Image (cartoon, rainbow, N blue to C red):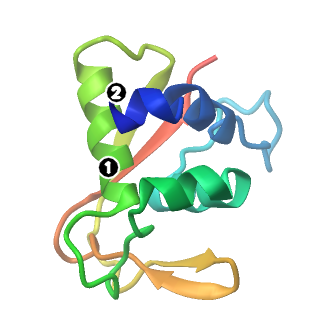
Amino acid sequence: MTIWKQYNLEERILNILNVRYSHGPEHHFGRPFLTPYQIAISFREQYQADFDAIGMPIGGIDTGQHNSFSQYIARELSRRIRNGSISNIEGSFLSDNHIVELIFNDSGHELRSSSINNFDLSMFRRID
């Protein structure tokens, strides 16, 4: 069984993408996007035992590995959106133009994106 199915990642990511609107749900921009880092951090916060069992680091510049949970999430969401097996999540990119550093709050620790200055950063949102 794949990690995706074993840990019910599609349903759990949909729940994570159900973020509050800081601007109100009636705003014409719609629901906010989340990066794979934000999704991975939220997954760990909500499903710590399953995150530990998956055994991948969140990711970021200081991970020292090329396989991370945030990369896995981005790859699987992209693949499943492209092949049509996921239709209620959309993806986009944040350009890395003029961004020097992107830092996430990982439970009080700074997590620096490894994508900036290498690739545009993917981001995803739930479609209602």
Label 1 crowd bin: few (<14), some (14–19), many (20+), radius 10 Å: some
Q: How many marks?
A: 2
Image coordinates of residue 32 in percent, x first then y, are 62, 43
Label 2 crowd bin: few (<14), some (14–19), many (20+), radius 10 Å: few
- Vertical comparison of 79 with 21: above or below: above
**Residue at 54% from the left image edge and 61% from the top image edge:** 52
Looking at the rendered structure, the secondary structure element under dot 1 is helix
- Vertical comparison of 63 with 3: above or below: below
Say left or right for 34 vs 31: left
On the question of residue 88 being in view, the answer is yes
Query: Residue under circle 2?
Result: 1
**Residue at 29% from the left image edge and 76% from the top image edge:** 114
Label for residue 72?
1
**Residue at 30% from the left image edge and 11% from the top image edge:** 84
On the question of residue 42 being in view, the answer is no
Say left or right for 37 vs 126: left
Foreground of the two, 17 or 120: 17
Whole-Å distance between the Cαs marked 2 and 1?
A: 16 Å
Foreground of the two, 6 or 88: 6
**Residue at 25% from the left image edge and 59% from the top image edge:** 120
Image coordinates of residue 97 in percent, x first then y, are 26, 70
Looking at the rendering, which quadrant does residue 92 occupy? Answer: top left
